[in-house]
Amino acid sequence: MVFDIVTFGSAVVDTFIDTEFNKKSQSFNYKAGSKILVNNMTTDIGGGATNTAVAFARFGFNTGCICKIGDDNNSNDVLEMLKKEKVKFLGKKSKGATGHSIILDSKDHQRTILTFKGPGNSIKLSEIPKIKAKWLYYSSMLNESLKTQEKLIKQLSKKGTKLAFNPSEYLIKNVNLRSMIKLSDILIMNKEEAEILCSKYKKKGSFLDGLISLGAKIAVVTDKNKMIYASDGIKKYSLKPNKIKVIERTGAGDAFAAGFVAGVMANRPIQKCLELGLKEGESVIQYFGAKNKLLKRKLKK
């Protein structure tokens, strides 16, 4: 089987807790030993690998997902969700608890995320089945999983697989990403991440020029509700987000990235890819959960 795209990243359970934010101290304040009443709580499956995999599958692409989960009840929820969304699980179950994130949300959209990675960062290359894919989308991983990503993208790129990379701020600050970026057909990050990356490698001028000079064939930079920019090294593109009511931002970056990459996979012009990414991201942030309102639209011909 040849997959249209395989995602490689994390799989976690997201628990959203609606609580109060202290604007004066710019923090969530909880007194030690106290019992705190919360306004609301919801649970959903999250993580970069599963979020993007579901997005690609809903666009009609034959999708696989590389992630590592535990052997608890949450792992069964992850597998059931992937099966329901017609995503092939290409990862592994191991002993212990599946990754979990506690997301503290306030009514003015401030949030703090407490994350337990579980077995997600211990994926070995030997645990991944032999795959054939037109595209590989890889999000930030650490430790053994990061080493495995580096090996896998080298192997697959030699076989003609195209690569899309969405690194995190932590990864940008602490890891030399030159070789991974150089192999990337698409590099997507937010403005803060792009600023850190370009500063780290002493790239002057615009962020887009800096990212392209590092080797990315297409670079995309987002900035929450401000202008989105992209470049293919020849032409630059931009798009202004719409003014919409934001309910919860978790998963918005994954949704935008998946929408943009899906547009490229469907051979759409870059400006249309930006529009598709924006529509996907804006659909998600109007609701709780990183997947609930992902678009269902067949792009694959």
Image (spheres, rainbow, N blue to C red):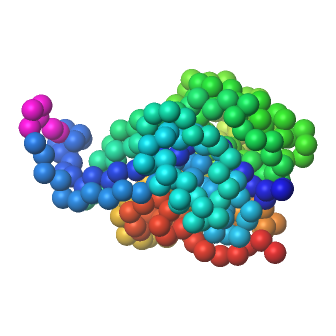
Nearest to the observer: residue 76 or residue 172: 76
Across and down, in percent, residue 49 comes to 59, 48
Q: Residue at x 56, y 31 (%)?
A: 121
Across and down, in percent, residue 3 comes to 79, 56
Nearest to the observer: residue 200 or residue 264: 264
Across and down, in percent, residue 61 comes to 73, 65
**Residue 288 in the figure: left or right of residue 157:** left
Quadrant location of the N terminus in the rendered image: bottom right
Quick check: is 183 in the magenta stretch?
no
**Residue 83 in the figure: left or right of residue 17:** right
**Region rendered in magenta:** 29-34
Q: What type of secondary structure mainly makes up the magenta span?
A: loop
Q: Is residue 201 above or below residue 65?
A: above
**Residue 109 in the figure: left or right of residue 291:** left
Nearest to the observer: residue 62 or residue 287: 62
Q: Is residue 275 visible?
A: no
